Image (tube, grey):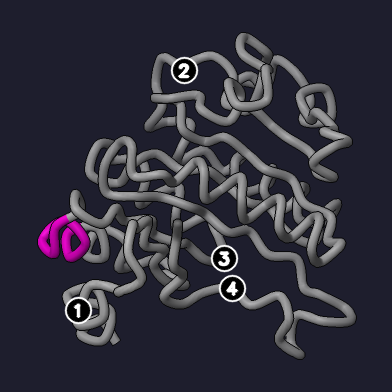
Amino acid sequence: EIHIMAGLDPTSPSNQGTRKPLSVGVTSPDFGDGKTTVSIALASSLAEDFSATVTLVDADFHTHSVGREYGLQGQEGLSEVLAGNVTLQAVTHRVTEAKMSIVTAGKTPSDPARMARSEHLTTLIENMKRANEYVVIDLPATLHSMNTPVLANRCDGVVVVVRAGHTTKQDLERVLHLLKDSNVLGVVVNRRNSAVPDWVRRTLNLRG
């Protein structure tokens, strides 16, 4: 079960009619917090519930979780496009049952930091936005990758996924500090009960 503290509202008047294309990154403090699950759920909901055109991009070269989820392991993906070996169109997989497109991470690059800082990545995201209403990007876990703040800054907005019973207040504060130059849309709490932890509310309020 998840609870969205704040974030993207496709039903709001500003997002209806002629939608401005948006890129939304999804990250978390730690491995196993459920960010890929939330990335897939967000992309699927936008595509199926709001009839939006969506591309889900795996930018987590550590886990390659999106590719595994859709049976696309070993396929060329984002890293090969950034290296100039293939075109974006060649690695974009249409998932008919999910009503969206998928771009896997591809092979782990020898220099992920260089790729994260590549201006080519900015161009790729803009190209995907031209072809979609939403681009959802599964980012690495923030506390395990120095590239996440760089990648997050390439997105129009970022969602942070925390895990009840695992993520600490200090972890969330560290993540928000590392993402201070990005537009954090809100926090998704993976939880077992119905109560949102008070420290999550206080941390978000303190961030202002």
What stretch of residues is rendered in magenta?
A: 168-174
Task: List x then y, in percent, for residue 154.
Answer: 52, 55
Q: Give me the C-alpha separation between circle 1 and circle 2.
A: 40 Å
Q: Quadrant of residue 172?
A: bottom left
Q: Give me the C-alpha separation between circle 4 and circle 1.
A: 22 Å
Q: Which residue is mark 3?
A: 156
Task: List x then y, in percent, for residue 68.
Answer: 58, 21
Q: Which residue is mark 4?
A: 8
Identify the amino acid type marked 2: Pro
Whether residue 138 is situated above or below residue 64 in the rendered picture: below
Q: Which of the marked residues, 4 or 3, is nearer the chain's N terminus?
A: 4
Q: Give me the C-alpha separation between circle 1 and circle 3.
A: 28 Å
Q: Residue furthest top?
A: 74
Q: Are marks 2 and 3 in contact (CB under 8 Å)?
A: no
Task: List x then y, in percent, for residue 182.
Answer: 41, 66
Of the numbered discs in the image, which one, if any, rests on residue 198? 1
Secondary structure state at the residue bearing disc 1: helix
Instruction: Kindly identify the residue that appears in the image at 80 percent across and 28 percent down.
Output: 93
Q: Nearer the viewer, mark 4 or mark 1?
A: 1
Whether residue 12 is situated above or below residue 95 in the rendered picture: below
